[in-house]
Structures are given as structure tokens and as C-alpha cells.
Image (spheres, rainbow, N blue to C red):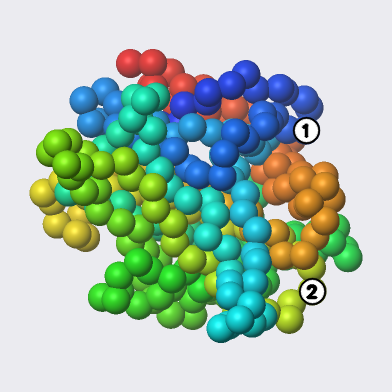
Amino acid sequence: MKTQVLTFALTATLVASSAFAQVEPEHLDVEFGYSAGGTELEIEVGEVTATGVPIFEGTFEEFDEFFDAGNLTAEDPGFATAPDEGLDINVGDQIFLNVLDSSTSALFGGLGYVTRYNPLTDQLEAAGQISIIDNTAGTADLVLNGDSIVSGPTSQFIAEAEADLTGGVDEFDEHIVFDLLNDNAPPAAYGILVELQSNFAGTSLDEFELTSEPFWIILNNGIDPIEFDRTAVRAFETAAIPEPGTFGLLAAGMAGVLLRRRH
């Protein structure tokens, strides 16, 4: 099977510094859609790490204070198309969220499947148990614990694109649930490195025609919002800065990626 690479489209000017580059995010959703005849998928990006890995944010909140008091979950960021901006997919396409091991490359700067920012030590650590709840009863929920997978497949179903009343594709706007399993955990931020996958209409569920470049989802649990952006998100942004001896190799590799995208 031929796997196409999803490309990210930066929709605002990046402000660079020696440590990191970022722009302010405009929304809580990861907006995506096909381009170039369906061979690529563009994603609107807000913040990025020093090595260009996109960042999207969310917050753990009490799911239902009456029926399920104390259960901390996050439903943002969501995943949406934006037809007015040329970001759309096909009727029947099934979209999945695949979780990656962030320790596999210095480019990502993570420590496993869940990378926790500890505000007491101002450090990242491989810790924290999070479940990602699939939007179908047919797939086991994914349970992650720091640098290990407790149970379930890493690809979790988000939704299938449906037709609207005119027969065209209905606007895709879906959310899945990130469940913090320790509801009494002290304030911290949790980073999960993920990629989007699409079966691109008509192919097998376990064959993905389009797979995105990785991006971070960083979820806040109890940190003051200003401090979250100032310390927790910044820790993920700067963690991906490579060692001096490897920076030249990474820069050359990124230059090659940019050159390939222009063709």
C-alpha cells in the first residue's frame, strides 16, 4: 500500500526566536482537509515547537458534576473540516487518531506515549495514565501510562464523513474523549504525540492512504491558564531543541523535507 504524507499549512506568520517559534492559535479544533487531488492533507497550525512540530491545546474538566462528579476528561481539541477555507474530505472517509511514542526522535522532545510536565520540578517526565475513548463500540479504548501502552490499539476512530442533504460532504466536526484516569492527580500538563489517519474512501479500515506528520496535543490539568502557556507549553516547545552536535543533521533533514514539498 502506498502511504501519502500529510502536509501542514501554516496560516499565520511564525515569530521565531533562538528557543522556539509560535503563533497564537485561532481555535480549539484541528482543522484539516485534502489538497492536491487528495494526495496531501493540510492542517491549520497554531503553535509549533522549535523543530516545527505543531501544538494543539486542551483542558481536563469535570465531565458531569451531577451524574459523574469528579471525572476529569477533555474533549478539545476537536477535529473539523473547513470547506470555506478549502479544507474538506470525501463522503465515506474514515478518520482515525493514532498515538505515537514521542521518545523515538529528538525532533519531538517527548519521553513516551504520555509526557507529563510537572510544575513542581519544571521538568518533563514519562508519567500519567490517560485513556482515549474511541467513537465506536467495536474498538477497545486505548489506555496509556507514561512510556507504555496498557491496552487497546493506538489508532482510535474519530468519525466517518457523511453526506449532506444535497449529496455533498457534510461538514466534519467531531470530538473524542481524553480521560485522565487519576482524577486526584496534582496539577500538571500531559502531552500526547499523535497523527491523523484517513482510509481515503473505499479502502480497508486497517489500510490508511493518508497519514499526517506528528503533532502534539497538550492537556492542562489544574495549572493556571497563564502559567500553562508560560511554563508547560513552553517546556514542550523547547524540549525539542536538538543538542548542538545533532542540530546540523536535523536542519539538513528538515531542508530536504521542505524541498520535497515544493515539488
Instruction: Identify the residue at the far right of this view.
Output: 120
The amino acid type, in three-letter code, at marker 1 is Ala
Q: Position of residue 22 (x, y in %)?
A: 68, 31
Does the rendering let one see residue 261? yes
Does the rendering let one see residue 113? no
Whether tag 1 and tag 2 are in contact, CB under 8 A, the answer is no
Q: Position of residue 234 (x, y in %)?
A: 76, 44
Total of numbered circles in the picture? 2
- The residue shown at (65%, 66%) is 61
Establish if 87 lies above or below 144.
above
Q: Tell me the SS state at disc 1.
A: loop
- Residue linked to disc 1: 19
**102 lies left or right of 173:** right
**96 lies left or right of 100:** left
The amino acid type, in three-letter code, at marker 2 is Pro
Tell me if mark 2 has few (under 14), some (14-19) or many (20+) residues whose alpha carbon lies within 10 angstroms of its own: few
Q: Earlier in the sequence, mark 1 or mark 2?
A: 1
- Residue linked to disc 2: 186
Residue 84 position by quadrant: top left
- The residue shown at (44%, 57%) is 175
Q: Tell me the SS state at disc 2.
A: loop
Q: Position of residue 140 (x, y in %)?
A: 35, 77
